[in-house]
Amino acid sequence: LRQEYEAISIIIETSITSILGVSFILIFHSITALGLAYFIGSLSAFMYLNIKTFSQIFPFEPLNTSLIMYYLKKMIPFIGTAFLYFALLGSDTLMIQWLLGPDTLGYYHSGLKIMETFLIIPMLYAIALYPLITKYKDDRRYIENIIKNSSTLMQLIAFPMIGGALLLAEPILYFLFSEGFKDGLQSFQFLLIVGLISFFTILFQEVLLGKQHEKKVLFANGSGFFINIILNLILIPRFGIIGAAMASIVGRLVILALFTRLIIRHEKIQPFLIKDTARYLFYTGIMIASVLFLQQYTTHLFVNISVGIIIYATLLIITRDRIVLAVKNMFITHHPSASV
């Protein structure tokens, strides 16, 4: 109920780490200095959270062993889910390192880091959404509204973002990492598709956890993880880092399919609205066509990105998109019996 504290701590940690990280690298030319920047950023966020929660934490209550064991038991599915999420990312890294070597791993990581940056949006949204789902989990009308509107919002953001990134993948990769990373271009494009799928797996996971489907979420993530491992063993030796990206696509599609099935079967809610999906795909298509036309006259990355954003936003405004009009009410704090 105080997630603004968490949001501010993330801003503090990210800002300090980024500023000091760049400064220390330029001054000391050492990855140890970069590690120090991470430490200072994390410590700053930790101190902020302690200051904000000191009065609520101290003095400690007398130790209640049975209560602690109860919460530890309840945490197991959440711990397993978090482990599998990071294991999905880490397994690709380890297997590429073992099968292809560190140089190839660097090419893969260049695209992976860009894709992970895109996922900050659904992650922060899902974090903010989780308390609302738990609070109103018995209000079916609200849960249906929030799932459908949240899914539509993710489509509104993800389709143009990932579509534009796919179109401009080469200049984006070269701008951020240099042309020396051209061997990672194709895997980056495949990883962008992973990112598109992840927009919805991240959202649906928080919805299902909030509705107390922890074990089912754990099973879905575990299924995707093991499929990813098996496909890595098959595809990496044959296709290299592109094979790893292809395995990630399949693994996350399995997770998304299982999450969607759970929402439809257990909550009786269809999370995707076909009309909205078709509309945002159409808008994205117009945006991409416009940027392709513009590239005949300029290939400047920021000009192309800016024009794409303007065209897409203009389409949303002139059609009076319902999500754009309603987004200010997405995180209502009163009892949300009225639809969003």
Image (cartoon, grey):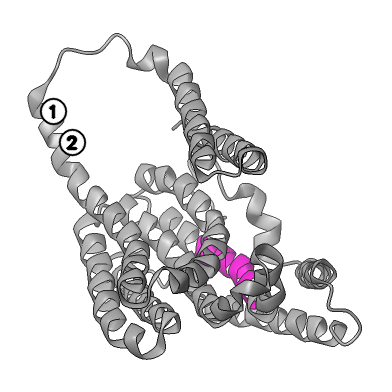
Q: Nearer the viewer, residue 209 or 96?
A: 96
Q: Could you tell me the amino acid type at mark 2?
A: Tyr
Is residue 160 visible to the viewer in this orientation of the structure?
no
**On the picture, is 31 further left or further right than 88?**
right
Q: Nearer the viewer, residue 280 or 195?
A: 195
Question: Farthest bottom residue?
Answer: 238
Q: Residue at x 51, y 45 (%)?
A: 31
- Quarter holding the C terminus is bottom right
Residue 119 location (% of width, % of height):
52, 60
Q: Nearer the viewer, residue 323 or 204?
A: 204
Question: Farthest right residue?
Answer: 297
Q: Which residue is mark 2?
A: 71
Q: Are marks 2 and 1 in contact (CB under 8 Å)?
A: yes
Q: Nearer the viewer, residue 26 or 190?
A: 26
**On the picture, is 275 further left or further right than 103?**
right
Magenta region: which residues?
A: 148-163
Whether 150 is among the magenta residues is yes
Q: Residue at x 45, y 27 (%)?
A: 46
Q: Could you tell me the amino acid type at mark 1?
A: Leu
Q: Secondary structure at mark 1?
A: helix
**On the picture, is 229 further left or further right than 69?**
right
Whether 66 is among the magenta residues is no
Q: What is the CA distance from the residue labelled 2 to the residue labelled 1?
A: 6 Å
Task: Tell me the tag on residue 67.
Answer: 1
User: Is the residue marked by circle 1 packed among few (<14), some (14-19), or many (20+) residues within 10 Å?
Assistant: few
Q: Is residue 284 above or below residue 120?
A: below
* Count of numbered circles on the image: 2
* Image quadrant assignment for residue 298: bottom right
Residue 321 location (% of width, % of height):
71, 67
